Image: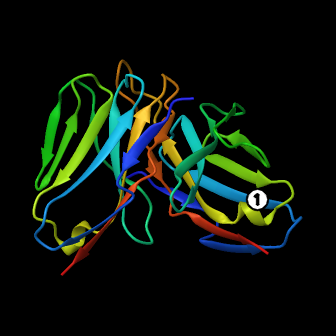
Amino acid sequence: GQQVMQIPQYQHVQEGEDFTTYCNSSTTLSNIQWYKQRPGGHPVFLIQLVKSGEVKKQKRLTFQFGEAKKNSSLHITATQTTDVGTYFCAASSSNTGKLIFGQGTTLQVKP
Amino acid sequence: DVKVTQSSRYLVKRTGEKVFLECVQDMDHENMFWYRQDPGLGLRLIYFSYDVKMKEKGDIPEGYSVSREKKERFSLILESASTNQTSMYLCASSSGLAGGTSTDTQYFGPGTRLTVL
């Protein structure tokens, strides 16, 4: 079945450094969503990208959808301790509303 | 605000017991989902439902069953719990209204950490 690969699995950064997580699929995606899960919490929706080459920003977070709609990235500029958590990408499989989640990237930020 | 609640935050059961995990959403959502989350494996879909009394297998349905008798409630059942079912279980719901190339946002419950001894 469809798979979504996400790298890296873990990332430790110094506060103020940048961070990027990547999501890749072997098939063309209808769209991609990004979720954040704080330690001890549950995944919370951040954004959805639908168009080829789309770029969206939320403050220090920049989300990109590849031109071929097979990959996506989330970049955080100047990380803060509040950015700590696990970031998941999730791709749509069909019109059922079902999502295929990547394995997640866990971000640790050293103050 | 959408609210998804799960019956327990922590649960400890013994091997062979029948386990019920309950999930309730208050936003009249059509779709409901059960995932398990394990380190390094992300969220894996167990079952989902897009209507009352309808259910579809996800990626890892073995050892589980589900029930959706009412729109707001989706139950996950472990017929005979085993130690390899020790995990974090997350329920989610979505509206079912998205069309075209969009997919509905999923709203997650707080999770149930199940330990099977």
Position of residue A95 relative to residue A46, above or below, is above
Residue A43 left/right relative to B63 = left
Residue farthest to the right, as pictured:
B16
Residue B76 left/right relative to A13 = right
Disc 1 designates what residue?
A: B20
Position of residue B48 relative to residue A39, above or below, is above
Q: Amino acid at mark 1?
A: Phe
Q: Residue at x 33, y 45 (%)?
A: A34
Residue farthest to the bottom, as pictured:
A111
Identify the colour scheme used: rainbow
Q: Quadrant of the N terminus of chain A?
A: top right
Q: Position of residue A25 (x, y in %)?
A: 40, 32
Q: Quadrant of the C terminus of chain A?
A: bottom left
Residue A64 left/right relative to A106 = left
Mark 1 surroundings within 10 Å by alpha-carbon count, few (fewer than 14), some (14 through 19), many (20 or more)? some
Q: Residue at x 86, y 68 (%)?
A: B15
Position of residue B81 relative to residue A51, above or below, is below
Residue farthest to the top, as pictured:
B100
Q: Nearer the viewer, residue B93 or B11?
A: B11
Q: Nearer the viewer, residue A33 or A109?
A: A109
Find residue A67 and report its image quarter.
top left
Find residue B97 and report its image quarter.
top left
Chain of the residue where label 1 is placed in the rendered structure:
B
> What secondary structure is marked by label 1?
strand
Q: Position of residue B103 (x, y in %)?
A: 39, 30
Q: Position of residue B87 (x, y in %)?
A: 64, 64
Q: Residue at x 41, y 54 (%)?
A: A104
Tell me how many marks there are: 1
Q: Position of residue B110 (x, y in %)?
A: 50, 63
Q: Nearer the viewer, residue B78 or B93?
A: B78
